[in-house]
Image (cartoon, rainbow, N blue to C red):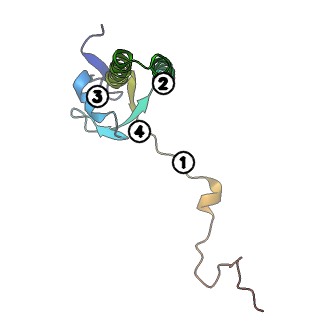
């Protein structure tokens, strides 16, 4: 079992606990309370591998329940599938990494482009006259 601090701020090193990371896992950015800098919320590659494994296991359990077609096995399979997804839901915060926010540099093509007004635009689709 991992200890309480799940991840830390890359700027000041403040450690965030599991429940804080659990609450911000669906956000793109979060602010550190100590240094007041914006952090990016990133998922590690293990999350995607774990998601595939759980999806395949859930599909296998559902197929086995359809083959058995008995009341007890259907209920048991539904509970097992629910347990797998709850396990995944609570495992995701352990695989979140908070990184420094990086501003993307502008490309050369975007900086030299002139703004066009309506008269300079070209309409490629023109009405057909009959």
Closer to the chain start, of discs 1 and 2, is: 2
Which residue was labeled with disc 1? 105
Q: Residue at x 30, y 7 (%)?
A: 1
Q: Residue at x 62, y 66 (%)?
A: 113
Closer to the chain start, of discs 2 and 3, is: 3
Q: Is residue 65 left or right of residue 17?
A: right
Closer to the chain start, of discs 3 and 1, is: 3
Residues at marks 4 and 1 touching, judged by CB atoms closer than 8 Å: no
Question: Label 1, label 2: how many angstroms apart (C-alpha)?
Answer: 38 Å
Residues at marks 1 and 2 touching, judged by CB atoms closer than 8 Å: no
Looking at this view, is 87 or 75 the one in front? 75
- Could you say which disc has been placed on residue 55 in the image? 2
Q: Residue at x 64, y 55 (%)?
A: 108
Closer to the chain start, of discs 4 and 3, is: 3
Question: Label 3, label 1: how many angstroms apart (C-alpha)?
Answer: 29 Å
Residues at marks 3 and 1 touching, judged by CB atoms closer than 8 Å: no
Tell me which corner region of the image, top left, top right, bottom left or bottom right, holds residue 79: top left
Q: Secondary structure at mark 1?
A: loop
- Could you say which disc has been placed on residue 101 in the image? 4
Tell me which corner region of the image, top left, top right, bottom left or bottom right, holds residue 40: top left
Q: Secondary structure at mark 3?
A: helix
Question: Label 2, label 3: how many angstroms apart (C-alpha)?
Answer: 24 Å
Which residue was labeled with disc 3? 21
Neighbour tally class for label 3: few under 14, some 14-19, many 20 plus, Cα within 10 Å: many
Which tag is nearer the camera, tag 1 or tag 2?
2
Q: Residue at x 23, y 25 (%)?
A: 19
């Amino acid at each position: 079992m991992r200890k309480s601090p799940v991840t830390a701020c890359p700027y000041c090193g403040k450690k965030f606990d599991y429940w804080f990371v659990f609450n911000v896992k669906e956000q793109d950015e979060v602010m550190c309370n100590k240094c007041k800098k914006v952090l990016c919320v990133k998922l590690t590659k293990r999350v995607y591998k774990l998601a595939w494994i759980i999806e395949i296991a859930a599909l296998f359990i559902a197929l086995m329940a359809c083959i058995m077609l008995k009341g007890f096995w259907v209920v048991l399979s539904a509970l097992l599938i629910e347990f797998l997804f709850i396990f995944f839901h609570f495992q995701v915060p352990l695989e979140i990494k908070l990184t420094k926010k990086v501003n993307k540099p502008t490309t050369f093509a975007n900086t030299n482009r002139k703004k066009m007004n309506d008269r300079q635009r070209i309409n490629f689709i023109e009405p057909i006259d009959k």
